[in-house]
Each structure stands twice: as structure tokens, then as C-alpha cells.
Amino acid sequence: MSKTMETLINDIRYGIRGLRKQPGFTLIAVITLALGIGANTAIFSIISAVLLRSLPYAQPESLVVAWGSQEDMLQSSALSYPDFADWRAQTQTLEHVAAYLRTGTLLRQPNTDPEPITGAAVDADLFPMLRVQPELGSVFTRDQDQVGAAPVIVIGHNLWQRRFNTDPQIIGQQIRVGSTSATVIGVMPADFRFPPQAARTDYLRPLAQTLGEGAKERSVYQLPVVARLKPGVTAAQAENEMKLIGQRLEQQYPDVGFRLGGGLIALQESMVGDSRTSLLVLFGAVGLVLLIACANVANLLLARAAARQREMAIRTALGASKWRVVRQLLTESLLLAVLGGIVGLLLGIWGVKTFAAGDNPLNIPGMKDAGLDPGVFAFTAGVTLLTGILFGLAPALSVAGVRMRDALRESARGGGVRQRLRDLLVVGEIALSLVLLIGAGLLVSSFLRLRDVNPGFDAQNVLTTSLGLARAKYPDPEKQARAFGEIVSRVASAPGVEAAAVISPLPFSGTTSANTFLIEGRPAARPEDKPTANYRAISADYFKVMRVPVLRGRAFNERDVADAPPAIIVNESFTRRFFGDSEALGQHITIERADVAEQAKAEIVGVVGDVRHEGFDAPAGPEFYVPFQQAPESGMDLVVRTSSANQAGGVRDRIKQFDSEQYIPAIRPLTELLSASLDRRRFDTLLTGLTAGLALLLAMVGIFGVTAHAVTQRTREIGVRMALGAQPRDVLRLVLGRGLRLTLYGIGVGLVAALALTRVLGTMLYGVTATDPLTFIAVSVGLILVALLACYIPARRATKVDPLIALRYE
């Protein structure tokens, strides 16, 4: 064994003995570090899964998402099937183009209960685009992906294992999905999932076959599109080509308002969305907590060093080099860091499991896959090593090389350089804590303001569920309209139900449907000049169920049926945008939608209040409502106003009385949907608040420790003061004043940092600015009060000093 290795082993043994002799110090230091390292490990594991890990497809960097453009609307990734098909046929820059539609259905197997399964209807180009091969059998081809072709299905590995016992003879078998049967032609690999953000993929079906006649509708925009760039082609080149194709389609189909030609972004970037800012802010927050933890442990080591300065001076006098002493002290610091890292890793594992619990945690794509992979282990190891050096270097350098005479003199005068260093560390802790507290305060204020926003309807005592009619049983629009009408009628007559209605799409569901239209007497010079508004199909009692006020005119009634004159109801934003001070009632508009009384003029019969359909933070835009009988759909959302919250069973029974095979997802209160829309903000606010609270606790421990140590060092001075006539209140003022000065210095530094750093929160705030003075003042005052409280205990102890004992101190 080399001499260097033998020396290192001796240092480790000596360090372990030293830590065992002071279990209280060791425990506090390890817990402090574990909290900081564990929080960083947990957040980094999520960042690794969401932001850093590549998509599970070959060459994912060449996969892009197509965005359509629509007048007066934010960009939307939904295209119509004909636009997608034309783009696929004309592109020269894309190797593959595939559209898809997320779907759900029921798997109905003999002698078993129906099971809801989730998957997607995909274009046949998806498989060569993703470069995936089935584990068993084959995937469907373009010939099989045709309207009217024999139904086929590719199932996921999990479903194959769960329901078919990994039977290799599954290929060629017929299974019943929904109300139809399909032939299983393939099984996908165990790690395959599409769309990428899906919790699981139970099946894939041909897209055109699933859409049926809807594949001919150029005005129905519901398909996300993914494409793969050809080798050597940039996204900008493909985007320019897409816009040229869009211009050709405008000339070919001048009466359709929606046009291909928005842009292309990376598939992974489209998945991440606004999660990036939230996660990076949280990562920065836990990083600051780790710095505070390091400062705290450094303070503990500095206090410990005061008791060891004689020891180190003697070791130096006996011939130990300064580097030898520093190495010994750094070894002890690294031992603490390793212990803290091990405990922190365990905390990180628990944190990751907590965050990733559920099928779709917090709607953050990829979070379900968060775990402790080699990259996370490497990060934790690196953080542990850096932490040990960071908090151990200053105490080691402050002690190493101290001569005996200087050690005795410094002890006599109460700490000198080390005390000033400890003061600086506390100032830094307070500054970092202030930054985190202000950030948390801004997010809390924003969350409370957002939670109190009036969505435009009353969600209390409203139940909702999504209903999809089987096309095999209800193939045409007339049968679909009659079915939903009968469901609404039966549910409305159930005990405890005040009113029932259907709508598509439901508020806060994350789904929108926009349409172009023309106002009578206002022709559009160009297709892109046509106005656009969000569109919703509803039944007669919808406004009654949701308690949306009808401001002028009337709501829909039983006379607004399929063969009645087309009628629409608009919201206030619609009237302000398109009619200004003029009266909208009685005006006529032509809705450009093939399945809504094509090219027929609809009369505006009512004006209702604005509803925030897309979220609390999304202002209401122009919207119009049509009777669902005049715009039948096979899938709608049921809303039911009840006299109490426990009416779900009665609602389910009434639907089953109408159709015993109808699949009914969970019937839940509408308030849950509204609350779920705030999950991401609640997560950001809660986690930032927890990190800020942890930082505050660590900072208060730090200022308490520094104040207590200062009182111990100045015991003789305090005794002299009291012997000369100082009163307890004078001593209290002396100690509290010192703590207050440190706090004010920290607040001064923290305010400057907060003004610069909190600006990154701008996109995460609602109704409050990143420099909100009320938050800055309230947090600063609160921090001062908490710091004074932390100083009060050692200050109170200082007032109890006996002058006679103090004069004999040391």
C-alpha cells in the first residue's frame, strides 16, 4: 500500500472518530446537507426525464411538429385530414408525415367486464417515420388505412400481457373494441408509446378508417401532425415549403378559412412547452437551498474549529504542513458530505416517487419516466463532492497553519477572522432566503388571484362526464342527435337532478374548436380576412346548468331542432369585437362548417356572458354557440346540476337505462376539473414555498448559531458591562442589535438580487408583477421579525449572565 493511500485511510479513520465523538453536530450537519442534496436530486431527476432525455425513437432530433395558422387565433397544431393528405403528397423536404388522433374505447372480451383502453388512431406513415418494428406480427399499411377497409388493430405490449397472457397466437384473432370487431395484426414492443406524452399506448388503429366520412372534411381541424425531416434538410427549409403548399391550397380551396402554413418546431420542444420555465425556476430554487445548507454547515464547522485551533496549532508546531492539516479537515468535510449525500439520495428517491405518482402527474410530459438513472447518480455524486469542498474549504483554511501564540490571542479576543467569516455566511444565507421568499410570495399571490377569478359559470354541484357514442350503433348525425337528446332527457328526470345538458367541447377540458364565418353584409376580400371565433355545440338547458347569464335575447329551446331555422348565441366578447356599439341580436352570420347547416345563414337569437373556457388565466375570446341538434357529434360532454354532490350513481343508472352497452367514464364534480387546471401552478407554488420555507429555517438556524456563538465568545465582556451597571435590557438591545444588523445587511443584498432574479418568474405570474412592492415589503418585514425571534433566545440567555462567573470566564 502506498504511503499516500495509507495517509488517506488514516485521515478517514481519524475523521470518523471525530464525527462519532460529536453525534449532535454530525446529525445536524448531515440532515442539513441531506435536505439540500435530496431536493436537488429530486428536481434534477425530473429535469433529466423531461428536458434532457431524448425521445424513445430513432434520430429524434429530426422529428418536428407542424403548426397550422388561423386568423385571429393563437397557433394551433390541429389540421384537417384533407390538408394533411395534400401536404404529405406535395412535400419534398419531409421524409414522412403522419397525423394522429388520441382516442379511447372499451375492450369487450367474452366472460370479462369491459375495460377502458387508451391509444391513438394513426396514419400508416407513423411506423416508418418513427422507425419502429412490432414485436410480433406486422403494422398496417397505407392500403389498410382507407375508409371502408377491413378493421385492423395493433395492440400494445402491456395490453397483450395484461389481457391476452402474451399469447403468440393473438395475431389474426378478432377482438371487440367499442361496438366493432377488429383483427389483431401486430403487437408493439414493451417500451413503445405514442403519443410520446401518453401514460401508455394500448392500441393503434388506422386513422382514415377511424375518421370515416370525417376524413373528407377540410373544415374540421382535429389532427396533430408529426413529420421527419429528410437528411440535410433544416426545419426552416421545410417550414418555407409548408407555407408554399399552404398558399397553393388557398388558391385551390378559396372558401375554406383555415390554411396550412404556420411553422415547425421540434417534437420534444412541443412536448415540454411551458414546463421548461417552471422546472428551471424550481431547480434554481433548490440550488439556492443547497447553498444555504452549505453556509450553515460551514458555520457549524467554523464554530467547531474554534475548539480545535489549539489542536491544529500543536500539530503544525510538531511538523505537520499546512496542506496536511487542510487535507485532514477537508477529509472530515467530505465524510459529512458523503453521509449527507447518501441520506439525500434516499430523500430524492422518495421525492421522485411522490412527484411521479399517478397516470399523468401534473400534466408534465415525461415526468412519469423520472427516476434515478446513471445521469442522476452522477449528478448527485458531483453535487456531494462539490458540497463537501464548498463548505469545508473556508473552515479548513481558517484553522490550518495557526501558530500557538496566535491561537491563544484569537481565542481571548473572541474569534476575530472566523467570527467575521461566520457573519458573512449568515448575511449570504439571509440574502438567498429573501430571494426565495419573495419568489414564493409572488407565486402565492399569483395563485390566490388566479383561484379567485370568476370563470363565468357556477361549477358548484355540477357533475360531468364524457360520452362517446359507438359509430356502429349510431352511424349518422340524426341518430347521434336523438341519442344525446334522450340521454339528457332521462338524466334530467333523475331524483336530485335540477337540469342536464350536453356540450362540445367542455370548458377547461383543454379542447377548443374554432370556425371561420361571414357576417351578412360584410364580405371578405380574401380568405384570410374572414373572422374566426370559437364554436361550441350545446343543448337547450346548458346555460341553466352552468348558470351562465343570458344578457339579451333568449337561450335555445326545444324548437331549435335540425330542420328549424339555424340559430346561434354569441358571447359579449363576440359582440364587442364584431359589432361594437351596434346590436347583435337579429343579425345573421354564415358559419363555414360543412356539418353545421352548410352555408346557411344563422340568426343571432341571444347574447350571453363571457366564459373562460380555456383556463382561469386565459381571457374569454369571441365565441358562439349552436344547438347540438343542428351540429350533431358522436362525442359530447354531459353536465348535470344536482341538489347534492352524491348523485353520480343516479346519473349513471339513467344513462345505462338508455343504452346498457354505453361506456361511461368517471362521473366527477366539475369543480375537480377546474381545480385540476391549476395543478401545475399549485405544484410550482407549493414546491417553491416549501423550498423557501426550508431556506428560511436554515437561515434562522444560522443566525441563531452565530448569535449564540457570539454571546459565548463575549461572555466576559457582557459580565464586565453588567458589573459596571448595564441592565438586562441593555444587554438584550446589544445582542438583538447585532443580529438585526446582520439581517438588514442580508436583506439589502437580497433585495438587489431579488429585483434581478424574480423577473424570470414573469411568465408564471398572474395579476401581479415580478417587482410587486407589497410582496417585497411584506417578506422583508416578516424576515426581520423571524430573525429577531431567532436572536431572542441567545439574547435572553445573555441577560442571565452572572457577572462574577463571567469575570472568571476563560
Image (tube, grey):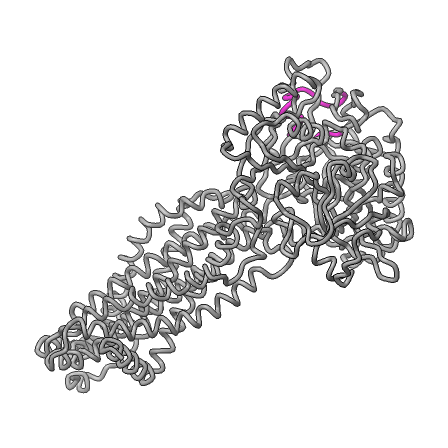
Q: Residue at x 42, y 62 (%)?
A: 378
Q: Residue at x 65, y 30 (%)?
A: 88
* Residue 242 drawn above or below residue 719: above
Q: Going by the image, does 790 lie left or right of 673?
A: left
Residue occupying the far right of the picture: 657
On the image, the x and y values in percent for residue 579 come to: 66, 21
Q: Nearer the viewer, residue 802 or 727?
A: 802
Q: Is residue 581 magenta?
A: yes
Span of residues in magenta = 569-586
Q: Is residue 737 magenta?
A: no
* Residue 517 drawn above or below residue 671: above
Q: Going by the image, does 727 lie left or right of 388?
A: left
Q: Going by the image, does 593 lie left or right of 50?
A: right
Q: Quadrant of the C terminus?
A: bottom left
On the image, the x and y values in percent for residue 169 come to: 80, 58
- Residue 494 makes an appearance in the image: yes
Count of residue discs: 0
